[in-house]
Image: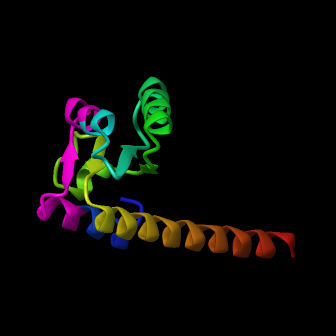
């Protein structure tokens, strides 16, 4: 998983019963407007990524790409998850934003050292 905090937030949502996984279940939740966040494994096929990008865009549902998304819920074979609670959705998005900020800072630091 991309970061321990992100992984823990997704796992907590699953334990609380606010996370559904699997293609059919997630698509059904998104189309019904009940998904507050869709998490797609970065290893998903390009066709799957594009299908969920279009679906989430059409239904105005946030989409997050994550490494080993299924691993966070104890089901490594799952590539797509839906979070149904707005509080858990916000917590997961915040954890993802923190991770992205850390990665950007690390990249900038590495680039600064390479320039010298």
Tell me if 8 is positioned left or right of 109 in this view.
Answer: left
Q: Is residue 75 above or below residue 45?
A: below
Q: Is residue 15 above or below residue 58?
A: below
Q: Is residue 95 left or right of residue 12?
A: right
Q: Residue furthest top?
A: 47
On the rendered structure, is 116 left or right of 41? right
Note whether 3 is above or below 21 in the view shown.
Answer: below
Q: Quadrant of the N terminus?
A: bottom left
Residue 87, position as x, y percentages in the image: 31, 68
Q: Position of residue 75 (x, y in %)?
A: 17, 47
Residue at the spot 28% in from the left edge and 47% down from the top edge: 82
Residue drawn at x 40%, y 51% is: 67
Answer with the quarter of the image where residue 110 lies: bottom right
Q: How many marks?
A: 0
Confirm whether residue 49 shows in the render. yes
Judge by depth and name the residue closer to the eye, 95 or 104.
Answer: 95
Prevailing secondary structure class for the magenta stretch in the rendered image: helix
In the rendered image, residue 106, in percent from the top left (x then y), is placed at 63, 73
Residue extent of the magenta highlight: 11-28
Q: Is the residue 3 above or below the residue 80 in the image?
A: below
- Residue 105, x across and y down, in percent: 65, 74
Residue at the right extreme of this rendering: 116
In this rendering, does residue 7 appear at all? no
Q: Is residue 106 left or right of residue 46?
A: right
Q: Which image quadrant is residue 77 in?
A: top left
Say whether residue 39 is magenta. Answer: no
Q: Quadrant of the C terminus?
A: bottom right
**What's the colour scheme?**
rainbow
């Amino acid at each position: 998983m991309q970061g321990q905090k992100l992984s823990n937030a997704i796992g907590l949502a699953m334990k609380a019963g606010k996370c559904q996984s699997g293609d059919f279940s997630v698509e059904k939740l998104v189309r019904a407007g009940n998904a507050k966040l869709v998490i797609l494994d970065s290893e998903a096929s390009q066709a799957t990524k594009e299908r969920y990008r279009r679906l989430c865009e059409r239904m105005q549902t946030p989409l997050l790409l994550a490494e080993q998304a299924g691993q966070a819920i104890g089901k490594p074979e799952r590539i797509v998850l839906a979070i149904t609670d707005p509080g858990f959705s916000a917590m997961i998005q915040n954890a993802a934003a923190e991770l992205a900020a850390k990665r950007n800072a690390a990249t900038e630091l590495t680039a600064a050292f390479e320039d010298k």
